[in-house]
Amino acid sequence: MAVRKGLFKKVLIANRGEIAVRVMRACQELGIHTIAVYSDADKDAIHARYAGEAHHIGAAPPTESYLNLERIMKVARDTGAEAIHPGYGFLSERPEFPEACAEAGIAFVGPPARAMQAMGSKLEARELAKSHGVPVTPGSDAITDLDQAAAIAREIGLPVIVKPSGGGGGIGMKVVEDESDLVPAIQSCSNAARSAFGDPTVYVEKYVKNPRHIEIQVICDSQGGAVHLGERECSIQRRHQKIMEETPSPAVTPEIRQRMGDAAIAAVKAAGYVNAGTVEFIFSEGDFYFLEVNARLQVEHPITEQVTGIDLVKEQLRVAAGLPLSFAQEQIEWRGHAIEMRINAENPAKSFIPNPKRIQRWVGPSGPGVRLDSGFGPGSDVPPNYDSLVAKLIVHGTDRAEAIARASRALREFVLVGPATTIPYHRAILEAPDFRAGKLTTHFIPDHPELIQEMQKYLDQPSPMDYSSVDLAQVAAAAAAAHAAASQS
Ligand code: MV4
């Protein structure tokens, strides 16, 4: 990487929605000129209006716009962008992106292509981690022989989980309880892996039952500096989509945090990683096992920012410019407790089916310890072409009890009329005794089907912040009707 004297003056943000706005907010504060890109579906989007300049890159389908590397690179070259921030999703973890940037002499605000490549292969990442002393579950190399697979599974001991090497996020994974199910599981996983990732390679791991999903935030500079910023508890997820995250984890002690943090740093350093990244672990009965590395800034990064006071996007921009991190490990202090709730335009009562609609009324929650990251507002259209995240509500309190109370308070204030959303579902989670007791596993959502019923009582409760109608009962009825209509359609 070329050594620079200071920060960038012009940055292109190759993304949309809340994360594009989040990155531009950091740029705005740093005096960096921002360049947005947008699709047909996002002509009036906030991210395009927020930027110093905005350029149309194509039609609404992602493949014709936010996934079109050539178009994005052309805008970057034409506008003289010195750096590109990829956000998350879209092209953010494609090694071709940092490669194209290197070729164009533009800094990529993310890891080098070779580190990204290494982390993209889950088997390679696992081997790298293992060889650097990071705990992994007992497992196999790439399965090449179906007859050998049975012997391997017997050696590891059932249950096992069959995983694709080509990509993470739970796609194609199969849990095997009976030996007779092993070969079909390998074939099914391999087929899914081939079509999703273009790589049929699979491997087998000992299956850890009812684990927590806990991840460590790391950031590395190009001078060898590497720090961890503690954990995020991400067990509350549905079909591998996180719904609510918190930090610290109710299960992690300072001693465990230190061991997980050291392991996470060892894993990313082994890969020559630079920039912000996340090391995922499964956690069970006090033990943790490496899963994979997410080579990007994640959706849930704000809870880490709230408890550490560190702006991860500003640090990303520093390290991408060749500057050292602005702080050392010893300077990091974790203060209080933070929770993020993903507010999706989805109907929880109907298997969380997306419900993209125009936002008719919107009053964001505010007050002490409340942060709202969104790329939408009153009058915004939520397009059907992209994911259904409309806002992230992040609360911070002195301890977990205050954070929970603050989360409930903020959700009560939030006026979001138009699409059905996950707001009432979050209110139900916050009241659940298991949640309050910190009893969390990756099966929390399927284990608590009653939350859908519990959510109903919030549908006809008006927000005290909704002044758009004199008749609050009428406002409540409109919100309930919107949910009811979404349930029928
Ligand atoms: C596992 C596991 C249990 N044992 N590996 C899923 C996504 C990817 N990041 C890794 N995942 C898991 N790997 C072993 N050896 C549990 C998960 C897992 C999970 C599994 C089923 C349903 C939901 C899950 C949520 C998080 C992690």
Image (cartoon, rainbow, N blue to C red):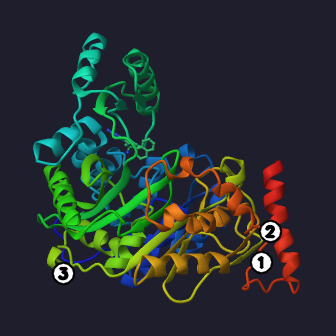
Residue 300 horizontal/vertical position (percent): 43, 64
Please tell me whether mark 3 sits on a helix, a strand or a loop.
Answer: helix
Q: Residue at x 29, y 60 (%)?
A: 216
- In the figure, 272 relative to 258: above or below? above
Please tell me whether mark 1 sits on a helix, a strand or a loop.
Answer: loop
Q: Are marks 2 and 3 in contact (CB under 8 Å)?
A: no
Tell whether circle 2 marks a residue whose Cβ is less than 8 angstroms from ligand 1: no
Residue 138 horizontal/vertical position (percent): 22, 35
Q: What residue would you read off at disc 3?
A: 331
Q: Are marks 2 and 1 in contact (CB under 8 Å)?
A: yes
In front of the other: label 3 or label 1?
Answer: 1
Please tell me whether mark 2 sits on a helix, a strand or a loop.
Answer: helix
The amino acid type found where label 1 is placed reads: Pro
Q: CA distance from mark 3 to mark 1?
A: 44 Å
Q: Residue at x 33, y 40 (%)?
A: 208
Kindly identify which numbered label has been placed on residue 143: none
Q: What residue would you read off at disc 2?
A: 479
So how many labels did they put on this image? Answer: 3
Q: CA distance from mark 2 to mark 1?
A: 8 Å
The amino acid type found where label 2 is placed reads: Ala
Judge from the rendering whether residue 418 lies leftward or rightward of residue 242; answer left or right.
Answer: right
Q: Nearer the viewer, residue 77 or 392?
A: 392
Mark 3 surroundings: few (<14), some (14-19) or many (≥20) residues within 10 A? few
State which tag comes first along the sequence, 2 or 1: 1
State which tag comes first along the sequence, 3 or 1: 3
Q: What residue would you read off at disc 1?
A: 462
The amino acid type found where label 3 is placed reads: Gln
State which tag comes first along the sequence, 2 or 3: 3
